[in-house]
Image (cartoon, grey):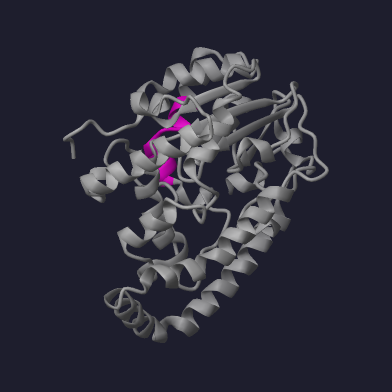
Amino acid sequence: MSGVVFDDLREARFAQRALVDAKRRRLRPVVPLLRAGLGLARLLGVEEPLFRRRFQPVVTRFAQRVEHAFDGYAPGASDVLVCSYFKSGTHWMMQIAHQIAHRGQGEYESIYDVIPWNEGPNPALGLPLHDPRPLRLSPTGLRVIKSHAAAHHVPYNEQAKYICVVRDPKDVFVSSYHFIASAMLGPLRPSVETWLNLYLSDGAFWGPWPDFTASYWRWRERPNVRFLTYEQVQADKPAVIRDLAAFLGVDLDSAQLDRVDELSSYQHMKANDHKYHQGVGTPFSPPRGEMVRRGRKGVSGELLTSRQQRRIDDYCRQRLSGLGSDFPYDEIYAVAPGSG
């Protein structure tokens, strides 16, 4: 890595992981009791208020971090901001953008060694925005920044580049439901219906999906912004890579384009899943979480009933309308009547 090292970040992650592992060992005997208590709460019909109280402080902390993540920072010509809603292919797009910036030769032990994410669950484990090391490594003078924040929390500068990604909110829900087990709660996650009620509320992680989508949809015609859907990328990733390389002003030959495509494949990223974790889980999550799960689209019916799918569609459609957004939800994401 040309003499650039990230030992400080590696040591911080190792120390945090050791703390969480020690707590996990101490708490392991009480997990069956907690599961029994959760089951009882579900039977008594109080699971949802229990989880709302549990998650409200977490949501509040995330909102505070989002509000202040870019304090004192103005993006410049070297910055490529990947602005993607939670569980919407964020690491996939981070990998694509980073590999374009490195002409298919981007290497790292953790993607958070080279990409700042100041909103994360533990910013101390990530790279500060002003850290010069990623640019020292970059052959194109570009580096990537990650954000889950809505557009009004992200500083806009005409010199910077913005890649905005949204995904079918029904698939987002399914991915998020599995994620809270793998990264946070393990066997203590709520029922699907309880998580759905939280998801379709102002108490959603990272805020409601329609608010995020509407905010970046307003930016879509700016020349330094690319607004993409997860489904577009999946439908023709090589074409998206070529377009993004041109958008970022990076000339890639055919071998480099193929290499970026290979390094952003599901197979490669799944095999290197450990490189995409900033956090180290909680005492209740499995020792090895799962960031890259299945990478598929349109399969929300495997977890959601048709009624639940329609609930998500109705909520998103109505909230987008209330926000005055003309995002074409029905054309892109609505479940066809009678499907599911």
For the magenta stretch, what is the residue range?
260-271
Position above or below: 60 against 3:
below
**Residue 267 included in the magenta stretch of the image:** yes
Is 78 in front, or is 317?
317
Q: Is residue 38 magenta?
A: no
Question: x, y (%) of residue 212?
Answer: 54, 38
| Viewer can see residue 118 | no
Question: Quadrant of the rendered structure where residue 159 is?
Answer: top right
How many labels were placed on the picture? 0
Q: Position of residue 222 (x, y in %)?
A: 64, 18
Quadrant of image for the N terminus: top right
Q: Is residue 339 visible?
A: yes
Name the residue at 36% across, 55% down.
196
Position of 110 with respect to 70 (left or right) is left
Q: Quadrant of the C terminus?
A: top left
- Furthest-right residue in this view: 72
* Most foreground residue, 337 or 187: 337
- Magenta-colored segment: predominant secondary structure: helix
Q: Of 269 and 51, which appears nearest the observer?
A: 51
Q: Residue at x 68, y 55 (%)?
A: 64
Q: Quadrant of residue 239?
A: top left
In the picture as drawn, the residue positioned furthest to the front comes out as: 322
The residue under the point 34% across, 27% down is: 330
Give percent across and percent down for residue 86: 50, 45
Does 246 sit left or right of 306 as displayed? right
Q: Position of residue 144 (x, y in %)?
A: 65, 34
